[in-house]
Image (cartoon, rainbow, N blue to C red):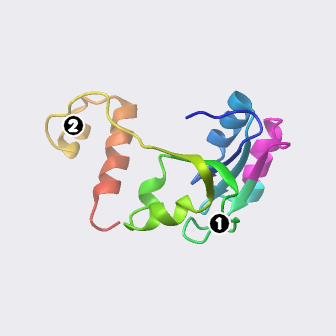
Amino acid sequence: MDLRPGMRVLDLGCGRATSSIFLRREFGVQVWATDLWFSATENFQRIDDASVADGVFPIHANARSLPFADNFFDAVVSIDSFPYYGTDDLYLNSLARFVKLGGQIGIAGAGLVQEVEGTIAEIAASGRASHRQRNEFTRESCHLSPRF
């Protein structure tokens, strides 16, 4: 993505706002750190501790009812959170209204770095996977479960 100082960026599904802090530090953008499951107050404390409170603004909001004006953002980023709220075929179009004409939407998700042979349960139980891979397998199986 082409992010430049002063741009307004929506970090949707930011979790604990670490990606928002990174975006502010690395690119000098203004970031609206938006999440439903993490407290804006707790995120503000992390943001303040990172000395970026002048450009990262924590928001507690549902991705399906965002409190922003149309055309407000230069960019929207969603890092490893889009599958939680973007499952409706029309969601991306509704999200795009918050982005200025010519703006950017970036969606990044977790993935595996090697081929996996066997089921997730077999690999996790066999000890062939590292601790990190076992956590990824567990998260991935949660995402794929029809119960979610």
Is residue 130 visible in this depiction of the protein? yes
Which one is in front, 99 or 17? 99
Q: Nearer the viewer, residue 5 or 84?
A: 5
At label 1, the amino acid type is Ala
Q: Measure the C-alpha gap from mark 1 to mark 2.
A: 37 Å
Establish if 145 lies above or below 106: below
Residue 61: image tag: 1
Q: Is residue 125 above or below residue 26?
A: below
Q: Which mark is residue 35?
A: none
Residue drawn at 14 percent across, 34 percent down: 117
Circle 1 or circle 2, nearest the eye? 1
Tag 2's secondary structure?
Answer: helix
Q: Which residues are magenta?
A: 42-57
Which element type, helix, strand or loop, lies under badge 1? loop
Q: On the picture, is 110 further left or further right than 25?
A: left
What number is the disc on residue 123? 2
Magenta span contains residue 47: yes
Q: What x and y, as percent, mark residue 12?
A: 59, 54
Neighbour class for label 1 at 10 Å: few (<14), some, many (≥20)? some
Q: Residue at x 83, y 35 (%)?
A: 51
Badge 2 density bin: few <14, some 14–19, many ≥20, Cα 10 Å: some
Q: Quadrant of residue 104?
A: top right
Please give the name of the residue rendered at 67% of the width and 36% of the height, measured from the top-left corner: 23
Instruction: State whether residue 85 appears in this view.
Output: no
123 relative to 60, above or below: above
Residue 88 position in % (x across, y down) = 39, 68
Q: Residue 139 versus residue 123: which sits nearer the camera?
A: 139
Residue 86 image point, x, y percent: 44, 61
